[in-house]
Amino acid sequence: MKINLIRHGKIAGNIEKRFIGRTDQPLCEEGIAELAGIVYPACDIVVSSPMLRCLQTAGIIYPDKKPLVYDELRECDFGIFEGKCHAEMDGDPVYMKWIANNGMTAPPEGEDVDGFRERCVRGFLRAVGENGNCGTISLIAHGGTIMSIMERFAVPHKEFYEYITENGHGFMTEYDGEKTEIRGAI
């Protein structure tokens, strides 16, 4: 089964390098313009996170397709770090400890990292399970969501942060029910 994993277009928080998870920011003008300059692969089904930035991206890329929304594909909740950038928190001992752990622990009042990754994988499996007979799927989600899916299923196996992709870009993959192979970049 062919699955395109596409990160949403750019939002103001991306430009400002803020931790934007649960904050429902729309695409910015720059993000909209960038999407228009990228050639996207055709698909039969569009699956999306419920966040506005993903739904807007889906509408721009695939205007003739109504996205199927999967709540499990939303981005991580960054807790007390939500909406802030490194410069605002540099030196804060709680933030510095989180950074020292490479973000691999739950941010205070935020989502557990393992729980986040498992949620994303559940959403992916549900989406392909419910739509796998319908042809090529384009999944529009967040950087962390895509990294979680790729870390779990991609071969050869790489670590979470090795699957980071720019806004509006992603991976064309082939999924066989157990693993996914990258067939190209978007």
Image: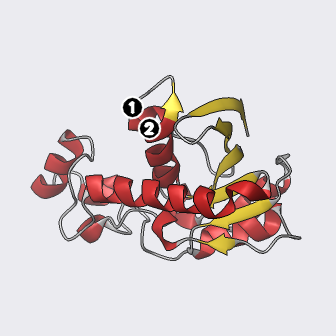
In the image, residue 112 sits, relative to residue 164, either above or below, namely below
For residue 11, what is the image quadrant? Answer: bottom right
For residue 9, what is the image quadrant? Answer: bottom right
Crowding near pointer 1: few (<14 within 10 Å), some, many (20+)? Answer: few
| Residue denoted by label 1 | 159
Residues 103 and 132: in front is 132
Residue 95 percent across, percent down from the top left: 19, 55
Q: Residue at x 77, y 59 (%)?
A: 134
Q: Quadrant of the N terminus?
A: top right
Crowding near pointer 2: few (<14 within 10 Å), some, many (20+)? Answer: many
Q: At label 2, which amino acid type do we have? A: Glu
Residues 111 and 155: in front is 155
Residue 162 percent across, percent down from the top left: 46, 31
Q: At label 1, which amino acid type do we have? A: Glu
Q: Is residue 164 found left or right of 136 in the rendered image?
A: left
* Residue that lies at the very extreme toward the left in this rendered image: 93
| Residue denoted by label 2 | 151
Q: Is residue 145 found left or right of 165 in the rendered image?
A: left
Residue 49 percent across, percent down from the top left: 57, 68
Q: Are marks 2 and 1 in contact (CB under 8 Å)?
A: yes
Q: Quadrant of the C terminus?
A: top right
Q: Residue at x 82, y 54 (%)?
A: 43
Q: Secondary structure at mark 1?
A: loop
Q: Is residue 59 found left or right of 90 in the rendered image?
A: right
* Residue that lies at the very extreme toward the top in this rendered image: 156
